[in-house]
Amino acid sequence: MTKFTLLIVLLIFPFSSNKTTDEGLKDLFEDSFYLGVAVNRQQVADNEKQLFPLLKTHFNSLSPENGLKWEKVHPQLDLYDFEFGDAYVGLGEKLGAFTVGHCLVWHQQVPDWVFEDAAGEQLEKSALLSRMEDHIAKVAGRYKSRIDGWDVVNEAFNEDGSYRESKWFKIAGKDFIKEAFRKAHEIDPDAELYYNDYNMWKTSKRAGVLKLAKEMKAEGIRIDGIGMQGHYMLEGPSLADIEQGIIEIAEAGFTVMITELDVDVLPRPSNSEGADLNMNYANSPEFNPFVNGISPEAEEKLAQRYADLFQLFLKHKDKISRVTLWGLHDGKSWLNNFPVRGRTNYPLLFDRELKLKEGVFEKLREVAGG
Ligand code: G3I
Protein backbone atom coordinates (compact mmCIF):
# COMPACT_ATOMS: atom_id res chain seq x y z
CA MET A 1 0.00 0.00 0.00
CA THR A 2 1.40 3.39 -0.99
CA LYS A 3 1.45 6.25 1.51
CA PHE A 4 -1.23 7.94 -0.57
CA THR A 5 -3.60 4.91 -0.44
CA LEU A 6 -3.01 4.60 3.30
CA LEU A 7 -3.96 8.23 3.76
CA ILE A 8 -7.17 7.74 1.77
CA VAL A 9 -8.10 4.64 3.83
CA LEU A 10 -7.47 6.48 7.10
CA LEU A 11 -9.59 9.39 5.94
CA ILE A 12 -12.48 7.27 4.77
CA PHE A 13 -12.55 4.74 7.65
CA PRO A 14 -14.04 6.98 10.33
CA PHE A 15 -16.92 7.95 8.05
CA SER A 16 -17.82 4.40 7.07
CA SER A 17 -17.81 3.32 10.72
CA ASN A 18 -20.00 6.29 11.65
CA LYS A 19 -22.57 5.20 9.11
CA THR A 20 -22.95 1.88 10.95
CA THR A 21 -23.24 3.62 14.34
CA ASP A 22 -25.97 5.96 13.11
CA GLU A 23 -27.99 3.18 11.53
CA GLY A 24 -31.23 2.66 13.39
CA LEU A 25 -33.51 -0.32 13.67
CA LYS A 26 -36.10 1.36 11.50
CA ASP A 27 -33.56 1.72 8.68
CA LEU A 28 -33.30 -2.05 8.42
CA PHE A 29 -36.96 -2.18 7.42
CA GLU A 30 -37.47 1.16 5.74
CA ASP A 31 -38.54 -0.38 2.42
CA SER A 32 -40.84 -2.86 4.11
CA PHE A 33 -42.91 -1.50 7.01
CA TYR A 34 -42.95 1.12 9.76
CA LEU A 35 -41.10 0.16 12.93
CA GLY A 36 -43.02 1.45 15.93
CA VAL A 37 -42.70 1.61 19.68
CA ALA A 38 -45.24 2.09 22.46
CA VAL A 39 -44.34 4.98 24.77
CA ASN A 40 -45.55 5.67 28.28
CA ARG A 41 -46.40 8.87 30.14
CA GLN A 42 -42.90 9.50 31.52
CA GLN A 43 -41.27 8.87 28.17
CA VAL A 44 -43.56 11.33 26.43
CA ALA A 45 -42.98 13.97 29.11
CA ASP A 46 -39.22 13.43 28.79
CA ASN A 47 -39.14 13.98 25.07
CA GLU A 48 -36.66 16.88 25.03
CA LYS A 49 -33.92 14.86 26.69
CA GLN A 50 -32.04 11.67 25.95
CA LEU A 51 -35.03 9.77 24.61
CA PHE A 52 -35.74 11.94 21.62
CA PRO A 53 -32.56 11.11 19.64
CA LEU A 54 -33.00 7.45 20.47
CA LEU A 55 -36.60 7.40 19.28
CA LYS A 56 -35.65 9.39 16.20
CA THR A 57 -32.84 7.00 15.28
CA HIS A 58 -34.72 3.77 15.74
CA PHE A 59 -38.44 4.24 15.20
CA ASN A 60 -40.76 5.85 12.68
CA SER A 61 -44.07 5.04 14.33
CA LEU A 62 -45.45 5.62 17.86
CA SER A 63 -48.21 4.03 19.92
CA PRO A 64 -49.42 5.22 23.34
CA GLU A 65 -49.09 2.37 25.84
CA ASN A 66 -51.78 3.52 28.28
CA GLY A 67 -52.35 7.27 28.02
CA LEU A 68 -55.22 7.33 25.53
CA LYS A 69 -57.22 4.53 27.12
CA TRP A 70 -60.66 5.50 28.37
CA GLU A 71 -59.87 5.64 32.11
CA LYS A 72 -56.90 7.93 31.45
CA VAL A 73 -58.34 10.29 28.86
CA HIS A 74 -61.96 10.33 30.09
CA PRO A 75 -61.94 9.47 33.79
CA GLN A 76 -65.32 11.03 34.64
CA LEU A 77 -68.47 11.67 32.64
CA ASP A 78 -67.74 15.36 32.11
CA LEU A 79 -63.99 15.27 32.49
CA TYR A 80 -61.48 14.69 29.74
CA ASP A 81 -57.74 14.80 30.35
CA PHE A 82 -55.77 15.49 27.20
CA GLU A 83 -52.45 16.30 28.82
CA PHE A 84 -50.82 13.04 27.77
CA GLY A 85 -52.57 12.92 24.38
CA ASP A 86 -51.49 16.41 23.39
CA ALA A 87 -47.87 15.75 24.34
CA TYR A 88 -47.95 12.35 22.65
CA VAL A 89 -49.30 13.67 19.37
CA GLY A 90 -46.81 16.55 19.55
CA LEU A 91 -43.98 14.05 19.98
CA GLY A 92 -45.23 12.04 17.02
CA GLU A 93 -45.22 15.17 14.86
CA LYS A 94 -41.77 16.18 16.01
CA LEU A 95 -40.50 12.75 15.08
CA GLY A 96 -42.38 12.74 11.78
CA ALA A 97 -43.72 9.38 12.93
CA PHE A 98 -46.78 7.42 11.85
CA THR A 99 -48.79 8.08 14.99
CA VAL A 100 -51.26 5.52 16.28
CA GLY A 101 -54.19 5.98 18.67
CA HIS A 102 -54.81 3.15 21.17
CA CYS A 103 -57.59 2.44 21.94
CA LEU A 104 -61.09 3.91 21.66
CA VAL A 105 -63.17 1.00 22.94
CA TRP A 106 -61.95 -1.83 25.19
CA HIS A 107 -63.34 -3.83 28.11
CA GLN A 108 -60.26 -3.04 30.25
CA GLN A 109 -59.12 0.28 31.64
CA VAL A 110 -62.65 1.64 31.25
CA PRO A 111 -64.40 3.03 34.35
CA ASP A 112 -67.61 1.41 35.68
CA TRP A 113 -69.58 4.66 35.34
CA VAL A 114 -69.44 4.31 31.55
CA PHE A 115 -72.04 1.54 31.78
CA GLU A 116 -74.28 3.15 34.42
CA ASP A 117 -76.74 6.00 34.72
CA ALA A 118 -76.63 8.64 37.46
CA ALA A 119 -78.52 6.29 39.81
CA GLY A 120 -76.01 3.50 39.24
CA GLU A 121 -78.41 1.45 37.09
CA GLN A 122 -77.11 -0.28 33.99
CA LEU A 123 -77.57 1.78 30.82
CA GLU A 124 -79.83 0.71 27.98
CA LYS A 125 -78.19 -0.10 24.65
CA SER A 126 -78.99 3.23 22.97
CA ALA A 127 -77.70 5.26 25.92
CA LEU A 128 -74.48 3.26 26.07
CA LEU A 129 -73.88 3.61 22.33
CA SER A 130 -74.49 7.32 22.47
CA ARG A 131 -72.04 7.64 25.37
CA MET A 132 -69.48 5.67 23.37
CA GLU A 133 -70.05 7.90 20.33
CA ASP A 134 -69.54 11.03 22.43
CA HIS A 135 -66.26 9.61 23.68
CA ILE A 136 -65.07 8.83 20.16
CA ALA A 137 -66.15 12.25 18.91
CA LYS A 138 -64.23 14.01 21.67
CA VAL A 139 -61.06 11.93 21.58
CA ALA A 140 -60.69 11.11 17.87
CA GLY A 141 -62.06 14.61 17.11
CA ARG A 142 -59.37 16.33 19.12
CA TYR A 143 -56.63 14.57 17.18
CA LYS A 144 -58.30 14.67 13.76
CA SER A 145 -55.66 14.58 11.00
CA ARG A 146 -52.92 14.25 13.64
CA ILE A 147 -53.41 10.60 14.59
CA ASP A 148 -52.82 8.47 11.49
CA GLY A 149 -54.57 5.29 12.57
CA TRP A 150 -56.80 4.21 15.48
CA ASP A 151 -57.21 0.91 17.27
CA VAL A 152 -60.96 1.43 17.33
CA VAL A 153 -61.95 -1.73 19.15
CA ASN A 154 -59.61 -3.90 21.18
CA GLU A 155 -59.98 -7.57 22.21
CA ALA A 156 -63.70 -8.15 21.66
CA PHE A 157 -63.39 -11.89 20.94
CA ASN A 158 -62.75 -15.06 22.94
CA GLU A 159 -60.21 -17.67 21.92
CA ASP A 160 -62.91 -19.84 20.33
CA GLY A 161 -64.05 -17.02 18.08
CA SER A 162 -67.17 -16.17 20.07
CA TYR A 163 -67.81 -12.63 21.32
CA ARG A 164 -66.27 -11.73 24.65
CA GLU A 165 -69.01 -11.27 27.25
CA SER A 166 -67.86 -7.77 28.15
CA LYS A 167 -70.21 -5.11 29.46
CA TRP A 168 -70.10 -3.60 25.97
CA PHE A 169 -71.30 -6.85 24.43
CA LYS A 170 -73.83 -7.73 27.13
CA ILE A 171 -75.57 -4.38 26.74
CA ALA A 172 -75.15 -3.62 23.04
CA GLY A 173 -74.28 -6.92 21.31
CA LYS A 174 -71.87 -6.78 18.39
CA ASP A 175 -73.40 -3.45 17.31
CA PHE A 176 -71.02 -1.68 19.67
CA ILE A 177 -68.17 -2.69 17.37
CA LYS A 178 -69.89 -1.54 14.21
CA GLU A 179 -71.00 1.74 15.75
CA ALA A 180 -67.51 2.44 17.05
CA PHE A 181 -66.01 2.10 13.58
CA ARG A 182 -68.84 4.11 11.97
CA LYS A 183 -68.37 6.94 14.42
CA ALA A 184 -64.58 6.95 14.20
CA HIS A 185 -64.79 7.23 10.41
CA GLU A 186 -67.38 10.00 10.61
CA ILE A 187 -65.17 11.96 13.00
CA ASP A 188 -61.86 11.51 11.17
CA PRO A 189 -62.46 10.30 7.60
CA ASP A 190 -58.72 10.23 6.82
CA ALA A 191 -57.66 8.06 9.74
CA GLU A 192 -57.01 4.37 9.20
CA LEU A 193 -59.17 2.20 11.44
CA TYR A 194 -58.13 -1.10 12.99
CA TYR A 195 -59.46 -3.98 15.05
CA ASN A 196 -56.72 -5.15 17.45
CA ASP A 197 -56.41 -8.45 19.37
CA TYR A 198 -53.97 -10.95 20.85
CA ASN A 199 -53.62 -14.61 19.80
CA MET A 200 -54.67 -13.82 16.27
CA TRP A 201 -52.47 -16.74 15.24
CA LYS A 202 -55.20 -19.02 16.64
CA THR A 203 -57.46 -20.27 13.84
CA SER A 204 -60.66 -20.20 15.88
CA LYS A 205 -60.21 -16.68 17.23
CA ARG A 206 -59.17 -15.34 13.84
CA ALA A 207 -62.22 -16.90 12.20
CA GLY A 208 -64.53 -14.97 14.53
CA VAL A 209 -62.72 -11.68 13.97
CA LEU A 210 -62.56 -12.04 10.18
CA LYS A 211 -66.23 -12.99 9.94
CA LEU A 212 -67.23 -9.75 11.62
CA ALA A 213 -64.64 -7.65 9.77
CA LYS A 214 -65.93 -8.93 6.41
CA GLU A 215 -69.52 -8.34 7.50
CA MET A 216 -68.65 -4.77 8.38
CA LYS A 217 -66.91 -4.19 5.08
CA ALA A 218 -69.92 -5.59 3.21
CA GLU A 219 -72.11 -3.10 5.09
CA GLY A 220 -69.87 -0.25 4.00
CA ILE A 221 -68.24 0.31 7.38
CA ARG A 222 -64.62 1.36 7.10
CA ILE A 223 -62.12 -1.07 8.62
CA ASP A 224 -58.63 -1.01 7.14
CA GLY A 225 -56.57 -3.40 9.13
CA ILE A 226 -56.33 -6.08 11.76
CA GLY A 227 -53.70 -5.84 14.49
CA MET A 228 -52.05 -9.09 15.53
CA GLN A 229 -50.73 -7.96 18.89
CA GLY A 230 -47.71 -10.27 19.01
CA HIS A 231 -47.22 -10.97 22.71
CA TYR A 232 -45.05 -14.00 22.07
CA MET A 233 -42.81 -16.33 24.06
CA LEU A 234 -39.41 -17.79 23.23
CA GLU A 235 -40.83 -21.14 22.18
CA GLY A 236 -44.22 -20.26 20.81
CA PRO A 237 -46.46 -19.69 19.01
CA SER A 238 -44.89 -21.35 16.00
CA LEU A 239 -43.81 -19.31 13.01
CA ALA A 240 -46.13 -21.45 10.89
CA ASP A 241 -49.14 -20.45 12.99
CA ILE A 242 -48.22 -16.77 12.89
CA GLU A 243 -47.66 -16.97 9.13
CA GLN A 244 -51.04 -18.58 8.58
CA GLY A 245 -52.59 -15.67 10.47
CA ILE A 246 -50.82 -13.07 8.35
CA ILE A 247 -51.83 -14.82 5.12
CA GLU A 248 -55.49 -15.29 6.06
CA ILE A 249 -55.95 -11.72 7.26
CA ALA A 250 -54.45 -10.40 4.03
CA GLU A 251 -56.51 -12.79 1.90
CA ALA A 252 -59.64 -11.52 3.64
CA GLY A 253 -58.76 -8.05 2.36
CA PHE A 254 -57.24 -6.38 5.42
CA THR A 255 -53.83 -4.88 6.10
CA VAL A 256 -51.88 -6.73 8.77
CA MET A 257 -50.10 -4.94 11.60
CA ILE A 258 -47.99 -6.51 14.32
CA THR A 259 -49.10 -4.03 16.95
CA GLU A 260 -47.69 -5.08 20.33
CA LEU A 261 -44.59 -7.17 19.80
CA ASP A 262 -42.58 -8.52 22.74
CA VAL A 263 -41.02 -11.87 23.64
CA ASP A 264 -41.45 -13.20 27.18
CA VAL A 265 -38.20 -14.98 28.19
CA LEU A 266 -39.42 -16.21 31.59
CA PRO A 267 -41.09 -19.53 32.37
CA ARG A 268 -44.87 -19.25 32.74
CA PRO A 269 -46.43 -20.96 35.73
CA SER A 270 -49.40 -22.98 34.51
CA ASN A 271 -51.61 -21.66 37.31
CA SER A 272 -50.49 -18.10 37.79
CA GLU A 273 -53.66 -16.32 38.83
CA GLY A 274 -54.09 -14.74 42.22
CA ALA A 275 -51.92 -12.23 44.02
CA ASP A 276 -50.61 -14.61 46.71
CA LEU A 277 -49.52 -17.19 44.19
CA ASN A 278 -47.87 -14.47 42.18
CA MET A 279 -45.83 -13.32 45.15
CA ASN A 280 -44.52 -16.85 45.60
CA TYR A 281 -43.70 -17.20 41.95
CA ALA A 282 -41.87 -13.85 41.89
CA ASN A 283 -39.75 -14.94 44.84
CA SER A 284 -38.96 -18.33 43.38
CA PRO A 285 -35.73 -18.73 41.38
CA GLU A 286 -37.53 -21.25 39.18
CA PHE A 287 -39.99 -18.65 37.92
CA ASN A 288 -37.81 -15.56 38.29
CA PRO A 289 -34.41 -16.87 37.19
CA PHE A 290 -32.76 -13.73 35.79
CA VAL A 291 -32.98 -11.23 38.66
CA ASN A 292 -29.29 -10.40 38.25
CA GLY A 293 -29.17 -10.52 34.47
CA ILE A 294 -30.32 -12.69 31.62
CA SER A 295 -28.25 -15.80 30.89
CA PRO A 296 -26.21 -15.83 27.65
CA GLU A 297 -28.28 -18.82 26.44
CA ALA A 298 -31.58 -17.00 26.94
CA GLU A 299 -30.16 -13.83 25.35
CA GLU A 300 -29.09 -15.85 22.32
CA LYS A 301 -32.54 -17.46 22.10
CA LEU A 302 -34.15 -14.04 22.33
CA ALA A 303 -32.00 -12.73 19.48
CA GLN A 304 -32.82 -15.76 17.35
CA ARG A 305 -36.54 -15.48 18.10
CA TYR A 306 -36.58 -11.83 17.04
CA ALA A 307 -34.58 -12.69 13.92
CA ASP A 308 -36.99 -15.49 13.00
CA LEU A 309 -40.02 -13.27 13.58
CA PHE A 310 -38.66 -10.39 11.53
CA GLN A 311 -37.62 -12.75 8.76
CA LEU A 312 -41.23 -13.90 8.62
CA PHE A 313 -42.53 -10.32 8.65
CA LEU A 314 -40.14 -9.40 5.82
CA LYS A 315 -41.32 -12.39 3.81
CA HIS A 316 -44.83 -10.90 4.05
CA LYS A 317 -43.91 -7.24 3.80
CA ASP A 318 -46.49 -6.82 1.02
CA LYS A 319 -49.19 -7.57 3.64
CA ILE A 320 -47.73 -5.87 6.73
CA SER A 321 -47.72 -2.09 7.15
CA ARG A 322 -46.22 -1.78 10.63
CA VAL A 323 -44.43 -3.72 13.36
CA THR A 324 -44.62 -2.06 16.79
CA LEU A 325 -42.66 -3.06 19.89
CA TRP A 326 -44.79 -2.95 23.05
CA GLY A 327 -42.44 -0.79 25.07
CA LEU A 328 -39.07 0.86 24.61
CA HIS A 329 -36.95 -1.02 27.14
CA ASP A 330 -37.03 -4.02 29.46
CA GLY A 331 -37.30 -1.95 32.63
CA LYS A 332 -40.72 -0.61 31.66
CA SER A 333 -42.26 -3.68 30.06
CA TRP A 334 -45.68 -4.84 31.31
CA LEU A 335 -44.16 -8.36 31.24
CA ASN A 336 -42.28 -7.60 34.47
CA ASN A 337 -45.74 -7.85 36.05
CA PHE A 338 -47.55 -10.43 33.93
CA PRO A 339 -48.56 -13.15 34.54
CA VAL A 340 -46.60 -12.76 37.77
CA ARG A 341 -46.02 -9.44 39.52
CA GLY A 342 -42.52 -8.26 40.33
CA ARG A 343 -40.32 -10.41 38.09
CA THR A 344 -37.32 -9.31 36.04
CA ASN A 345 -38.05 -9.84 32.36
CA TYR A 346 -36.10 -9.07 29.16
CA PRO A 347 -38.66 -9.01 26.34
CA LEU A 348 -37.67 -5.94 24.30
CA LEU A 349 -34.89 -4.66 22.04
CA PHE A 350 -33.38 -2.17 24.53
CA ASP A 351 -32.04 -3.13 27.96
CA ARG A 352 -32.66 -1.36 31.27
CA GLU A 353 -29.81 1.09 30.56
CA LEU A 354 -31.53 2.01 27.28
CA LYS A 355 -28.83 0.26 25.30
CA LEU A 356 -29.79 -1.52 22.11
CA LYS A 357 -29.16 -5.25 22.50
CA GLU A 358 -26.24 -5.63 20.10
CA GLY A 359 -26.71 -9.36 19.51
CA VAL A 360 -30.32 -8.80 18.51
CA PHE A 361 -29.40 -5.88 16.26
CA GLU A 362 -26.74 -7.93 14.47
CA LYS A 363 -29.16 -10.76 13.79
CA LEU A 364 -31.86 -8.37 12.60
CA ARG A 365 -29.34 -6.75 10.30
CA GLU A 366 -28.53 -10.18 8.85
CA VAL A 367 -32.15 -11.06 8.15
CA ALA A 368 -32.78 -7.61 6.68
CA GLY A 369 -29.86 -8.26 4.34
CA GLY A 370 -27.88 -5.24 5.55
O1 G3I B 1 -50.90 4.26 36.85
C1 G3I B 1 -51.00 3.38 37.98
C2 G3I B 1 -50.16 3.88 39.13
O2 G3I B 1 -50.68 5.12 39.54
C3 G3I B 1 -50.20 2.84 40.27
O3 G3I B 1 -49.35 3.24 41.28
C4 G3I B 1 -49.76 1.47 39.75
C5 G3I B 1 -49.88 0.40 40.83
O4 G3I B 1 -50.05 -0.88 40.28
O5 G3I B 1 -50.58 1.10 38.67
C6 G3I B 1 -50.51 1.99 37.58
O6 G3I B 1 -51.34 1.55 36.57
C7 G3I B 1 -50.89 0.43 35.83
C8 G3I B 1 -50.79 0.87 34.37
O7 G3I B 1 -50.49 -0.26 33.57
C9 G3I B 1 -49.72 1.92 34.13
O8 G3I B 1 -48.45 1.41 34.43
C10 G3I B 1 -51.92 -0.67 35.99
O9 G3I B 1 -51.87 -1.16 37.32
C11 G3I B 1 -51.61 -1.80 35.03
O10 G3I B 1 -52.65 -2.76 35.07
C12 G3I B 1 -51.50 -1.25 33.63
O11 G3I B 1 -51.17 -2.31 32.77
C13 G3I B 1 -51.30 -2.03 31.39
C14 G3I B 1 -52.28 -3.04 30.79
O12 G3I B 1 -52.35 -2.85 29.39
C15 G3I B 1 -53.68 -2.86 31.37
O13 G3I B 1 -54.46 -3.92 31.02
C16 G3I B 1 -49.94 -2.18 30.75
O14 G3I B 1 -49.08 -1.13 31.20
C17 G3I B 1 -50.06 -2.11 29.23
O15 G3I B 1 -48.83 -2.44 28.63
C18 G3I B 1 -51.11 -3.13 28.78
O16 G3I B 1 -51.23 -3.05 27.38
C19 G3I B 1 -52.15 -3.98 26.79
C20 G3I B 1 -52.71 -3.31 25.54
O17 G3I B 1 -53.24 -2.06 25.85
C21 G3I B 1 -53.75 -4.19 24.87
N1 G3I B 1 -53.21 -5.51 24.60
C22 G3I B 1 -52.59 -6.18 25.73
C23 G3I B 1 -51.51 -5.31 26.36
C24 G3I B 1 -50.80 -6.03 27.47
O18 G3I B 1 -51.69 -6.29 28.53
Image: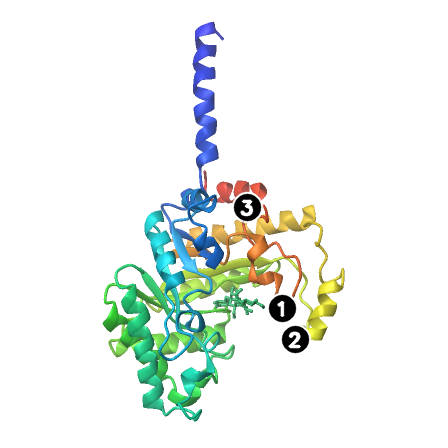
Q: By what rule are the colours in the image chosen?
A: rainbow
Q: How far, Cα to Cα, is label 3 from label 1?
A: 24 Å
| Mark 2 closeness class: few <14, some 14–19, many ≥20 residues within 10 Å | few
Q: Which residue appears farthest toward the front when viewing the image?
A: 79
Q: Nearer the viewer, mark 2 or mark 3?
A: 3
SS for dot 3: loop
- Quick check: can you spot residue 319? no
Q: Position of residue 88 (x, y in %)?
A: 38, 57
Q: Position of residue 163 (x, y in %)?
A: 45, 82
Q: Amino acid at mark 3?
A: Leu
Q: Is residue 238 above or below residue 305?
A: below
Q: How far, Cα to Cα, is label 1 from label 2?
A: 7 Å
Name which of mark 1 and mark 2 comes first in the sequence: 2
SS for dot 1: loop
Image point (40%, 61%), residue name: 84
Residue bearing the label numbered 2: 273
Q: Amino acid at mark 1?
A: Pro
Name which of mark 3 and mark 1 comes first in the sequence: 1
**Mark 2 near ligand 1 (CB under 8 Å)?**
no
| Nearer to me, 179 or 304 | 179
SS for dot 2: loop
Labels 1 and 2 touching (C-beta < 8 A): yes
Labels 3 and 1 touching (C-beta < 8 A): no
- Quick check: can you spot residue 369? yes
Image point (66%, 63%), residue name: 342
Does residue 180 appear left or right of residue 370 in this picture?
Answer: left
Does residue 165 appear left or right of residue 174 in this picture?
Answer: right
Residue bearing the label numbered 3: 354
Residue 339 badge: 1
Name which of mark 2 and mark 3 comes first in the sequence: 2
